């Protein structure tokens, strides 16, 4: 991974601007560490498509390192689809 991010320290500052997993929610900024596992994987899947915006490799590398960090540290962030998000207190999806 490049020198731009220092995982895990940057987990507390790196945000993702999101319209939700389905692109239909209001715009909100979420710390990458707070994205659900499913949402994080959908973002990476989207980034790997050839027909989408070309994200900087450092962003994609950070997202990939977050997946590895979660696996290595047995961290699971559940999906809150259709129920209140404990961070925001309301549902966005």
Image (spheres, helix red, strand yellow):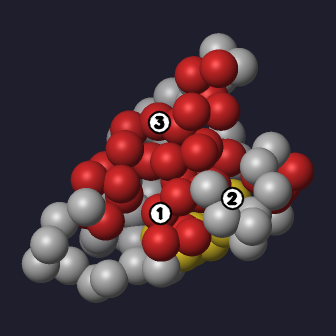
Where disc 3 sits, the SS reads helix
Residue beneath label 2, please? Answer: 31
34 left or right of 50 in image: right
Q: CA distance from mark 2 to mark 3?
A: 13 Å
Residue beneath label 1, please? Answer: 60
Q: Residue at (36%, 57%) from the top-left corner?
A: 43
> Callout 3: 10 Å neighbours few (<14), some, many (20+)?
some
- The answer to whether the residues at label 1 and label 3 have Cβ atoms under 8 Å apart is no
Quarter of the image where the C terminus is located: bottom left
Q: Is residue 84 visible?
A: no
Q: Residue at (57%, 70%) from the top-left corner?
A: 58
54 left or right of 74 in image: left
Residue beneath label 3, please? Answer: 37
- The answer to whether the residues at label 2 and label 1 have Cβ atoms under 8 Å apart is no
Where disc 1 sits, the SS reads helix
Where disc 2 sits, the SS reads strand
Where residue 23 appears, as percent x and y from the top left, is 29, 70
> Callout 2: 10 Å neighbours few (<14), some, many (20+)?
some
State the residue in front, 29 or 59: 59
Where residue 71 appears, as percent x and y from the top left, is 57, 22
Q: CA distance from mark 2 to mark 1?
A: 15 Å
**Label 2 vs 1, first from the N-terminus:** 2
- Of all residues, the one furthest to the bottom in this rendering is 53
Where residue 50 appears, as percent x and y from the top left, is 14, 72
**Label 1 vs 3, first from the N-terminus:** 3
């Amino acid at each position: 991974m490049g020198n731009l991010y220092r995982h895990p320290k940057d987990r507390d500052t790196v945000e993702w601007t999101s319209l939700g997993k389905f692109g239909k929610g209001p715009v909100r900024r979420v710390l990458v560490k707070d994205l659900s596992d499913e949402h994080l994987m959908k973002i990476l899947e989207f980034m790997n498509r050839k027909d989408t915006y070309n994200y900087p490799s450092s962003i994609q590398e950070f997202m990939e390192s977050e997946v590895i960090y979660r696996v290595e540290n047995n961290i699971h962030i559940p999906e809150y689809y259709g129920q209140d998000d404990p961070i925001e207190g309301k549902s966005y999806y």
